[in-house]
Image (cartoon, rainbow, N blue to C red):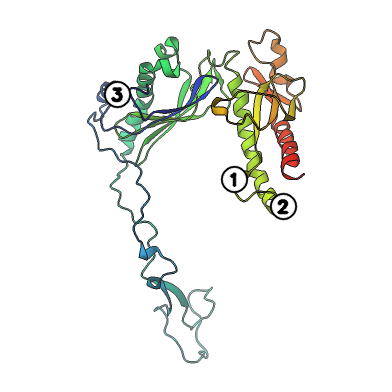
């Protein structure tokens, strides 16, 4: 695919595409033209509009401290100014006037502050057109995935069935892209943390997929590990965001993020406990990222397809204080993840 689109970038999890992004194109892809015509939509190409580059030219009207924004105190013209307080003046009609009969002094700037000039010619489509576009979003994504099944690995059966794992939840049209939001389910069961957006450019080229697209095969024994990894990523991120302010107030946070003590979190680890906070386990990681850091290890728990586990081992009723079971597998609870990370923070930042 990189030969066809040199701008394409990917992220991976367990050897499966976890995210995809590329640049818009000036032409409508062949796989989308017939779908657009059948829906009564214009299949002709549209000009490509990219996000504007940062501006470096001078903007004197936006210099809030400059001489062009002198502040003036002027009275509102609705009431005349009085030299002396009025005597028996009848009450004003507005009951909450703080100083009846006196001018209200306001502070204004001149000229007005213009924070960001808008020069957009974007006009959202009508509700009727937007509805028809929403109905072609999934068929166009399906056609794209058929052309690149060697990359995204959806499989012939899923593609032939029309991607029953994806369910359109929302569609919107913005200035620089169209966005279709999908939920995912496998065998009638929703997949945890699987909500994804597919982005199209103005010409209906697929330019972004924000999450992994699941199939029964990808959620088999080997691929089910992705879910536990996602749980660890989500709750670890929340915990570090929560702790950052406290570490800063304690004076324990380095001035530069490049100097923050780091750790490598390993999900599905083969250990005899629910989690380890400090481990010197030697690992090999793509691009050598995090190999030399300390390791937080989270246990590999029972899941569907593991011959060493019975179905009752990963039944939802088997959830407890240290692990939760759902979707055919078990993973450590957020409290376990936070406990191991808290141990790492205390030893690395507060010792």
The answer to whether residue 162 is seen in the rendering is no
Where does residue 250 sit, x and y in percent of width and height? 72, 52
Q: Decide: marks 1, 3 in contact (CB < 8 A)?
A: no
Q: Quadrant of the C terminus?
A: top right
Residue 250, which numbered label? 2
Most extreme residue toward the left is 44
Q: In the rendered view, would you say 224 is above or below 107?
A: above
Within 10 Å of disc 2 (Cα), the crowding (few <14, some 14-19, many 20+) is few
Q: Decide: marks 2, 3 in contact (CB < 8 A)?
A: no
> How far apart are the alpha carbons under marks 2 and 1?
16 Å
Mark in front: 1 vs 3 = 1
> How far apart are the alpha carbons under marks 1 and 3?
44 Å
Mark in front: 2 vs 3 = 2
Residue at x 46% of width, y 81% of height: 103
Q: In the rendered view, would you say 95 is above or below 127?
A: below
| Dot 2 or dot 3, earlier in sequence | 3
As helix, strand or loop, the secondary structure at mark 3 comes to: helix
Residue under label 1: 257
Where does residue 8 sit, x and y in percent of width and height? 39, 28
Image side of residue 269 versus residue 142, left or right: right
Residue under label 3: 32
Within 10 Å of disc 3 (Cα), the crowding (few <14, some 14-19, many 20+) is many
As helix, strand or loop, the secondary structure at mark 1 comes to: helix
The answer to whether residue 251 is seen in the rendering is yes
As helix, strand or loop, the secondary structure at mark 2 comes to: loop
Where does residue 86 sit, x and y in percent of width and height? 50, 89
Residue 273, which numbered label? none
Image side of residue 349 versus residue 35, left or right: right
| Dot 1 or dot 3, earlier in sequence | 3
**Quadrant hosting residue 125:** top left
Where does residue 166 sit, x and y in percent of width and height? 46, 22
């Amino acid at each position: 695919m990189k030969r066809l689109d040199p701008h394409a970038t990917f992220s991976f999890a367990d050897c499966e595409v976890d995210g995809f992004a590329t640049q818009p194109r000036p032409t409508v892809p062949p796989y989308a033209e017939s779908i657009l015509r059948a829906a009564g939509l214009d299949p002709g190409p549209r000009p490509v509009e990219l996000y504007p580059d940062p501006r470096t030219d001078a903007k004197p009207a936006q210099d809030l401290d400059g001489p062009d924004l002198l502040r003036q105190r002027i009275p509102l013209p609705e009431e005349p100014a009085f030299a002396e307080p009025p005597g028996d003046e009848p009450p004003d009609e507005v009951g909450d006037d703080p100083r009846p009969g006196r001018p209200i002094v306001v502070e204004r700037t001149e000229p007005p502050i213009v924070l960001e000039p808008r020069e957009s010619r974007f006009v959202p489509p009508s509700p009727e057109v937007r509805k028809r576009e929403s109905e072609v979003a999934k068929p166009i994504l399906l056609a794209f995935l058929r052309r690149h099944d060697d990359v995204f690995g959806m499989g012939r059966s899923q593609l032939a069935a029309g991607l029953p794992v994806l369910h359109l939840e929302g569609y919107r049209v913005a200035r620089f892209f169209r966005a279709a939001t999908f939920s995912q389910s496998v065998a009638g069961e929703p997949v945890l943390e699987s909500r994804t957006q597919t982005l199209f450019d103005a010409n209906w080229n697929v330019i972004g997929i924000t999450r992994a697209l699941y199939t029964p095969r990808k959620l088999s024994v080997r691929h089910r590990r992705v879910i536990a990894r996602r749980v660890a990523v989500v709750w670890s991120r929340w915990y570090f965001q929560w702790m950052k302010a406290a570490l800063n107030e304690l004076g324990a946070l380095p001035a530069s993020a490049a100097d923050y003590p780091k750790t490598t979190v390993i999900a599905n680890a083969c250990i005899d406990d629910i989690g380890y906070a400090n481990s010197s386990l030697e690992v090999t990681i793509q691009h050598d990222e995090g190999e030399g850091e300390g390791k937080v290890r989270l246990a590999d728990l029972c899941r569907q397809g593991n011959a060493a586990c019975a179905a009752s081992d990963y039944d939802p009723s088997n959830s407890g204080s240290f692990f939760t079971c759902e979707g055919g597998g078990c993973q450590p609870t957020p409290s376990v993840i936070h406990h191991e990370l808290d141990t790492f923070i205390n030893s690395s930042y507060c010792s």
